[in-house]
Amino acid sequence: MYITVSRPAADGRAGPGELRLAAVTQRAGIDRREFRPHDHDYFRDLFGTFGLTADQEGLAAGRVSFTDLVAAVLPDLLGGGNRFDLAVMASTAPDAEPGFPMCFLDSAVPDAGLVFGIADLGLVGVFTALWLAENRSRLGARRILVFALDQASVLHTEPVPAHLRVTEDAVTVLTLDVDAAHRVETAQPQPVPREEVAVCWSALLAGEQPGAVTALAGPGLVAVCGDRLPPGTVAVPAGRPASGIWSVLAAEWDGWRRTGRRVLLADYDPDLGRFAHCAITVEPDPAGTHVADSEEQEKLP
């Protein structure tokens, strides 16, 4: 978990201060590639080291790696100036091939800044990335990319917890820019006992103006709240643990930019026992031209 706080800028003030969202981009439905013969050997040896068995059916089904996902969405991102100060990759499932896709991003973007990844934080990984991005913006970062990556290949025979199981290869990218209009309010994910999660979520909603906010609850939050999920909450289905809740934001992005909307997003990771949330104030912008993927819009609520 990222826990460092921002240092003051040289003049005694924080950096740009508020985190601003410029665009939400997503891609899914990418064709799978076959595993190469030496990939079979690699994963067999890797899993065998830990007493596990490589899943031959999973290997035969092919893969869409994190690098594939980053490459698929990159043309849309490069339209924003071919530069970034920070890029963060957040995922729940391991990659389907050895390597680190952010190295590819670093070499593919003409003016690239710092790149790194967040893993092993389950359903709160992207929220942590956003909180980190807000801290980094106070140190002068002006353009930040947050990648939420889901790849569905399971290459071993061990069971995967339902809340972490990926059923669709997909990527959602949040482009943050200090000059954008849409404010993002983040918070560090906090430890919360399961029995108190519904109360925390209800308390957040109570602080919003009735009828003026769209509340998106991720699958971990939906599962732990059960019938205590507040009325009007949009329950995001499982299957895309990293990108799912953000893909709903992407699907609605153009409509909300035309009308304006306050959006509250939250999730709960049962393994870590941490509750995470953020709020986005989408300002009305009739001239907005960013278009989310149409096929994805048809799939999402």
Image: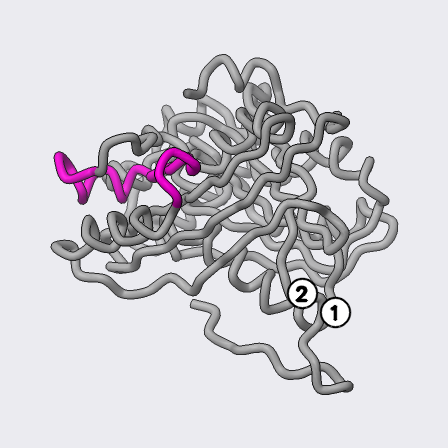
Residue 238 seen in the current view: no
Measured as percent of width and height from the top left, residue 74 is found at: 73, 36
- Is residue 210 positioned above or below 273 on the image? above
Whether residue 227 is in magenta: the answer is yes
Q: Position of residue 63 (x, y in %)?
A: 52, 29
Q: What range is drawn magenta here?
A: 209-229
Of 169 and 181, nearer the camera is: 181
Q: Is residue 95 left or right of residue 274?
A: right
At x 41%, y 33%, the residue is: 240
Residue 272 or 248: which is nearer the viewer? 248
Q: Quadrant of the C terminus?
A: top left
The percent position of residue 162, horizontal first and vertical second, equals 25, 36
For the N terminus, which image quadrant? Answer: bottom left
Whole-angstrom CA distance, mark 1 to mark 2, is: 5 Å
Label 2 sits on residue:
137
Looking at the image, which is closer to me, 61 or 132?
132
Q: Is residue 115 left or right of residue 83?
A: left
Q: Is residue 67 left or right of residue 297?
A: right
Which class describes the residues within 10 Å of circle 2: few (<14), some (14-19), or many (20+)? many
Q: How many marks?
A: 2
Report if the CB atoms under discs 1 and 2 are less than 8 Å apart.
yes
Please name the amino acid that badge 1 sits on: Gly
Which residue is identified by label 1? 140
Labelled disc at residue 58: none
Q: Does 301 appear in magenta?
A: no
